Image (cartoon, helix red, strand yellow):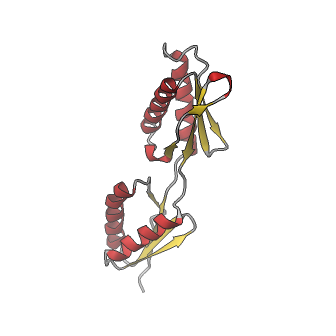
Amino acid sequence: MSKEASFDIVSDFDQQELVNAIDQTKREIGTRFDLKDTGSDVTLEENKFITILSTDEFKVRNIYDILENKVSKRGLDTKILQQSDAEDALGGKMRQKITLKRGIDQTLAKKIVAEIKGTKIKVQPSVQGEQVRVVGKSRDDLQAVISHVTEQAEQWGEPLQFTNYR
């Protein structure tokens, strides 16, 4: 009797690395000559949103670019940042809210399962909440599924990781 191997496909990120990236962004805002005394700020709210506050839209865009650079350097996928348009805030400032992408939604999960089944590799994909579990008898089959899903993830535009490989 052979033992089955499995892995999970998830969309998640390291919270501490994100906090570090935000801290580095704040530090750079304090030292850059064009942003130093503008009252600009970056805050993490409820671990779901990042808010950028500055005097005008150009500075908000600059701060977003700094944040994106820091997130990338910390080893996080920049696709976790879902940018919205800058809006007016109190005191004549501009605010931009960035939603953090975490978890695989049902439509993408169904797309992943259909894509895996379409490969005709002998594995069983199943949706489990905000992740997709793939079970198969051969680790080679699982490796083939991982490489196929990695290729497709670029087209889907989602940050996907593979965890619990057993």
User: Can you give x and y, in whole percent of width and height, for residue 20 in the image?
Assistant: 55, 34
The quadrant of the picture occupied by the C terminus is bottom left
Could you tell whether 55 is left or right of 157 in the image? Answer: right
Q: Nearer the viewer, residue 74 or 101?
A: 101
Q: Position of residue 68 (x, y in %)?
A: 45, 35
Between residues 151 and 95, which one lies in front from this camera angle?
95
123 left or right, relative to 23 = left
Instruction: Say whether residue 77 is visible.
Output: no
Total number of numbered labels? 0
Can residue 62 be seen here? yes
Horizontally, residue 74 falls left or right of residue 87, namely left
Question: x, y percentage for residue 113?
Answer: 43, 72
Q: Is residue 151 left or right of residue 14?
A: left
Q: Quadrant of residue 91?
A: top right
**Image quarter of residue 4:** bottom left
Q: Residue at x 35, y 68 (%)?
A: 145
Point out the residue furthest to the bottom here: 1
Measured along the vertical axis of the image, is residue 106 above or below residue 56? below
* Residue at the image point whose x is 37% and y is 76% from the top: 117
Is 12 placed above or below 42 here?
Answer: below
- Specify the quadrant that holds the N terminus: bottom left
61 or 118, nearer to the observer: 61
Vertical side of 76 occupied by 90: above or below: above
Tell me where residue 9 appears, x and y as whole percent. 46, 63
Residue drawn at x 58%, y 16% is 38
